[in-house]
Amino acid sequence: MTEHQTKPWVAAYGDDIPVTLPEPADRSLGALVDRACTEFGPRRAFTCVVPNGMNGSLRYSQVAAMSDAFASYLRHHCGLQPGARVAVQLPNGLAYPVAAFGVFKAGCVLVNTNPLYTPSEMIHQFADSGAEVLVISDIFAGKLAEVIPQTGIRHVVLAGVPEFFPRVPETIVRAVQKVWTRSLPPVPKLDVPVQRIRTALRIGRGLPKVTDWDSINPDDTALLQYTGGTTGVAKGAILTHGNILSNLEQVRAMGARHMTGEDCVLTALPLYHIFAFTANLMTFFEMGARNILVPSPRPVQNIQRALENYPVTWITGVNTLFNGLMNEEWFATYPPKHLKAAIAGGTALHQAVAERWLDVTGTRVAEGYGLTETAPLVSFNPLDQPVRVGSIGVPVPGTDVALVDDNADPVEAGAPGELLVKGPQVMRGYWNRPDETEKSIQNGWFFTGDVATMDADGFLTIVDRKKDMVLVSGFNVYPNEVEDCLAKLDQVLEAAVIGVPDANTGEAVRAYVVQNPDSEVSLTREDVVAHCRKHLAAYKVPKSVVIRDELPKSPIGKILRKDLKAEAKAEFAKGA
Amino acid sequence: MLTELETTLLGVMMMVIMLGMGASMTPRDFRLAFRKPKGILVGLLSQFAVMPFLGFTLAMLLGLPPALVVGLLLIACMPGGTTSNIFAYFSKGVLALSIMMTTVSTLAAVVMVPLLLGFYGGLAGVPAESSIPPGNVAQVLVVLLIPTLIGMVLRKLNPNIGATVELIGSFMGVVVILFLIVTWVPRNYQLLLDTGPTIYVATIGIGLSGMLFGYWVARALGQDTNRSRTISLETGIQNGPLAVLVITLSFAPALQEGLLLIPVLYSLFIVLTSTAITLWYRRNATREELARDAAKLGTAGA
C-alpha cells in the first residue's frame, strides 16, 4: 500500500506541509533555548501585562543570562544533579520562562504545577515526583507551612506576579497586592531555605556556568506533566526532550508558513498546562516572536489592556475563553486588528463559537487536538484549507492514528472508535505507574480514551470522551453533540451535559445551562427542551435541565463534567 | 478661609486628579460607552437633573441666606467626584460605570454647570454680586480638561506611566480631603462650632438625598440593584474640591468666606456619609452574591 492509502490525510498536507517530519535541530530544550537567545538577542521575548496595563518585558538576551544564572543556582547552590526534579508553580509571568528554562539548562526535570492547587494536591504532586526545589508564586506562599514538611523539597524560591517589572510598577503592583487586595500572605517560617528569585539569580551569577547540559539526550526526561485529575489521583506523564522537540517540529510543520519572528502571541492560558507550554512558550520563543503573558484571564476583562496595547497576531485558547472574549463588548466592538488566526484546543470547540469568532474577528479558529501524554499536539487543521467545522484536523506529520473498538480491533471506515496515537511525541509512560503505563501504551500505540471518527480525507472529529458517553436505553449519546446544540440557543452562554441514573432508561441525559447575560430572552427549561427536540433525536434530548449561574471549570477553562457528575451522584445517592 | 498656598495646592491636586482620570481611559472606552448609553444617560440625568433640583429644594426649605444658597447650588450642580470610583470599588459596584459617569459628567459640566447655576440661581433670587460668573466655571473646567488629555496621551505612549498616574490620581482624591481636614479644620474649629444646625442639615442632606434619589431614579429606569448602587454613590458624591477651587478663583478673599462654607463642609462630611453608605451597600452586594450562590446549589430536576 502507498502512504496515501494507509494515511489518507497526507493528501490534505498539500504542498506546504512536509510528509516526513524533519529531525529536530536541537538535542535538548536547553540547547533550543540557548540557540534562540543567541539568534534573537535584542528582541523582546516576553511581556507580562497585569489588568491595569502595568507591564514588564524581557529580551532574549536577558532571558539567556537569567536562565543561565538560575541553572547555576540549581546545580551549584542547591546541589541538584542532572535529572533532579524542580517543581514550578507559577501563574503566567516573567519568572516562569526564567525558572523553566533554567531547569532545562541545569539538565533537571521540570514539574509544572497548578498554582491553584490545594495543599493536599501539592503534597501529592511534590512527593510523587520527588521534587527537590520548588519555585512558587509569593501569593501562594501561605500554603508552604503545611506542604513542605510532607515533601522532599529542600529549597523554596519565591517569585512575584510583577517580578522583573521596572521598579516603579513592580513596587506599585506589590503595594496593591499587599494593602488593597491583601493577596500577599506572610511567608511562613520553614525548616528549608526560602529565597526570592532575584536573590537566587544573584547567587547564580556568582557561580560557574553550567556547561554539561549539552550532554543531555533527546531520550532524557524534560517534564513531568501531571494529568488525569479526571480519573482520580493525578499521575505524571514523562515527556522527554525528544517528545517536546518533535512536537515543536510538528507544530512548525503545520503552521510555519503563517508564523514569523514578528508575531505576537497572546498567552492567556496558563503556561504550566501543556497546551500553552508547547504552543505558546516554546513554539513562539524558538521563532523569535513575542509572548504576551497574562497572569490570570479571569475575569476575561483582565485581558483587555494586553489586547489593546500590543499588536497581537495569534491567540491560543479554549472554547470558554473565545466565548468569554466575544461576550465582552470591548472585544466584540474592537477585535484585535492584527490577528491572523486563533488556535483552539483543550476541549471541543463549539460550532456556534467558531462561527461567531469568524464573524467578530474576521479570522478563523483553527482547532487542534492534543493530550498531555502527547506533548500535546496530535492533529491540527491545515491553515490553508477552508474551515472544516467540528473537525480537529488531520494527524500532524510523523504521527499515525488508528480508530479501534473495545477489543482494540480497527473499526470500519467512518465509524466511531477509540483514537490511538503513535508518534515521536508520545510520552515514555507515567512516572512510577508501570500498571497505568501498560494500560495506556500498547505496542507503541497510546490509547487516548477519546472516541473519534475519520472521514475519507483523513480529517478527524472527536465524538466524545469514552467515559463521558451516556447510555440511554442502549443508545449512545455523546454529550458534545448535545452541548453543541445547546450552545446554538441564543440565551445559552454555556452548557454541559452528563448522564444521570434513570429507572426506565438506565441513564438519562441531563443538561446544565447558564443564562447568556447579553440575551434579551430569559432562559427557561421548556425552551431548552423544545430547542433540542427540534434538532436532536428524541433519545438525545435532555430529560432534565438545570439552570446555573456558572459551571465548574478547570484552570484552563474546560468545563468539568466530572464535577457535575460527582454532584449528581451525591444527589441521587441521597435521593435513593 | 483658604490661604494662597492652599488654593494653589488645591489647584495642583485637581490637575493631578484629572491627569489620573485621563489616564484611566481611552477614546475607545468613550465610543463603547456611548454605544450602550443607557446607564450613562441615567447617570447624567440623576447628576444634572435630580441633584440640582434637590439642592434648590433643600436651600428653599431651609431658608438659607444667599451666600450659602450659592454654595449649596454649586455643590449640587458639580460633576461626580473621582473619589466616587474608590467608593464604587469598595461597595462591589460597577467600577467601569462609575469611571465613565465621572468622566462624562465632568465633560458635560463645561456646559451644564453654568446653565444650571444660572437657572437655579435666578429662581432662588441670588444677588448678582454673589453669583458665580458662568464663564469662570467653564474656564476652570476647560483648563482641567488639558491634564485629562495629557493623561490619555500618557496612557497611550506608556502603559506603565499611564497606570501609575491613574493610581496616583485616584488616591489624590482622598489626599485632597485629608489635606482639607488637616489644614482647614484646626484653624476653623470655632467656625464649625458656631455653624448652625440648618447648615449641617444642608451639607449632609444634599449628599444623602442625592444617593437616595439616585438609587431610586436608576431603579425606576430599569437599572439592576448593583448598577443602581453605583449610580447612587456617583450621584451623591460630588466634586467638592472643584467647587472650592471655582469659588477661590472667582471671588476676592473677603467674599469667599460664606460661599465656601458649604462646599468645604460638604467635602469633609461626604467622606463620612459615603463610607457609611458604602459599607451598607457592600453588605447588600455580598448578600445578593450569597443568594445567587445558594440558588446555584439547588438542582431542580425536570
Image (cartoon, rainbow, N blue to C red):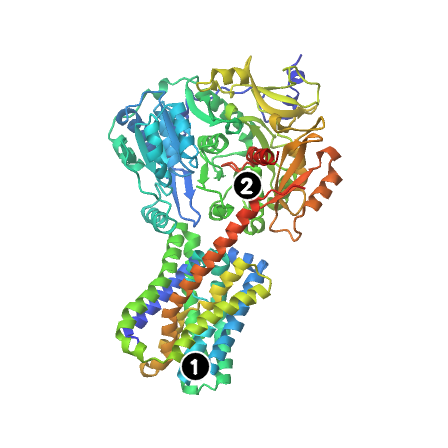
The answer to whether residue A307 is seen in the rendering is no
Query: Is A163 positioned to the left or the right of B85 in the image?
Result: left
Q: Residue at x 40, y 62 (%)?
A: B275
Could you classify mark 2 by the number of other residues whose Cα lies within 10 Å: few (under 14), some (14-19), or many (20 or more)? many
**For the residues marked 2 and 1, what is the alpha-carbon distance in whole angstroms?**
55 Å
Q: Chain of mark 1?
A: B
| Quarter of the C terminus of chain B within the rendering | top right
Residue at the disc numbered 2: A321
Residue A516: % across, % down: 61, 48
Q: Which mark is residue A393?
A: none
Could you classify mark 1 by the number of other residues whose Cα lies within 10 Å: few (under 14), some (14-19), or many (20 or more)? many
Query: Is A318 positioned to the left or the right of B182 in the image?
Result: right
Q: Looking at the picture, tell me which residue is in the foreground, A249 or B67.
A: B67
Q: Residue at x 51, y 63 (%)?
A: B231
- Check disc 1 and report its element: helix, strand or loop: helix
Please tell me whether residue B170 is drawn above or below residue A225 in the rendered image: below
Q: Looking at the picture, tell me which residue is in the foreground, A167 or B242.
A: B242
Q: Which mark is residue B69?
A: 1
Query: Do tags 2 and 1 sit on the same chain?
Result: no
Please tell me whether residue A131 is drawn above or below residue A511 in the rendered image: above
Residue B129: % across, % down: 40, 86
Residue type at numbered disc 1: Val
Q: Are marks 2 and 1 in contact (CB under 8 Å)?
A: no
